Image: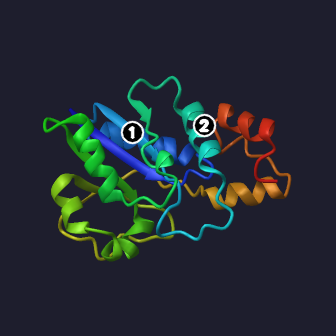
């Protein structure tokens, strides 16, 4: 079984995440793609990050209807910072030796890759896949990293949060169910 892992803050999830997931599933011929919302991401400033339960629920709502997509609570349930290598090991244990993993991240993560906990072990346990993000060139890509291409979408969760604070619409960038959840719960205002 070919399994993609797409971790992130998803603060909030948006159509860029979903498009990336669909394109990665297609190009990598994945049987399944697992979204892994973080509890507290180790490489990000914690200010402005919504509670993990809200972010998890928005991912669940956003992926409903796509049979290849799943969401994992593995990091949310830790209730502390989680490292990708630990998550990958747990998923390996869960799915067994027959599973082939593809760890998917954006090119914005490349600059921090050297600081990742047990990076070389991650390369052994999975195929590390990078997708180009606008404003983050694909420079100094380690030889163990596979790059996939897709049409660039200049969408960021930061910009979405700014729109919401400014009472501007997000209909064009956030899936309907997640947008309704944001509105119903008064999030990001």
- The vertical placement of 144 against 92, above or below, is below
Q: Nearer the viewer, residue 167 or 42?
A: 42
Which residue sits at x=64%, y=59%? 49
Q: Nearer the viewer, mark 1 or mark 2?
A: 2
Q: Position of residue 127 (x, y in %)?
A: 21, 53
The residue where tag 1 is placed is 34
Residue 109 on image: x %, y %? 41, 67
The circle drawn on residue 93 is none
On the image, which quarter does residue 132 sit in?
A: bottom left
Q: Can you say whether 154 is above or below 180 in the image? A: below
Residue 179 at x, y percent in the picture: 71, 38
Q: Is residue 148 visible?
A: no
The quadrant of the rendering that contains the N terminus is top left
Q: Residues within 10 Å of mark 1 (few under 14, many from 20)?
A: some
Task: Report the side of 39 relative to 46 (left or right).
Answer: left
Are circles 1 and 2 on residues that touch, CB within 8 Å? no
Q: Secondary structure at mark 2?
A: helix
- Indicate the secondary structure of the residue bearing disc 1: strand
Mark 1 / mark 2, whichever is N-terminal = 1
Which residue is more in the foreground, 73 or 101? Answer: 73
């Amino acid at each position: 079984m070919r399994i993609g892992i797409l971790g992130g803050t998803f603060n909030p999830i948006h159509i860029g995440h979903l498009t990336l997931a669909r394109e990665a599933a297609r190009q990598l011929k994945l049987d399944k793609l697992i979204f892994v919302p973080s509890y507290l991401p180790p490489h990000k400033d914690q200010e402005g990050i919504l509670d993990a339960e809200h972010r998890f629920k928005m991912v669940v709502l956003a992926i409903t209807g796509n049979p290849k997509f799943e969401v994992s609570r593995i990091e949310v349930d830790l209730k502390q910072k989680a490292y990708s290598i630990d998550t990958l090991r747990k998923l390996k244990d869960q799915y067994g030796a027959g599973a082939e993993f593809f760890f998917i991240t954006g090119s914005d993560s490349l600059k921090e890759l050297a600081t990742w906990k047990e990076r070389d072990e991650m390369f052994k346990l999975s195929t590390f896949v990078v997708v180009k993000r606008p404003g983050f060139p694909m420079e100094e890509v380690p030889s163990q990293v596979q790059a996939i291409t897709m049409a660039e979408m200049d969408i960021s969760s930061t910009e979405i949060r700014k729109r919401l604070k400014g009472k501007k619409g997000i209909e064009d960038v956030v899936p309907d169910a997640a947008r309704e959840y944001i509105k119903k719960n008064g999030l990001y205002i």
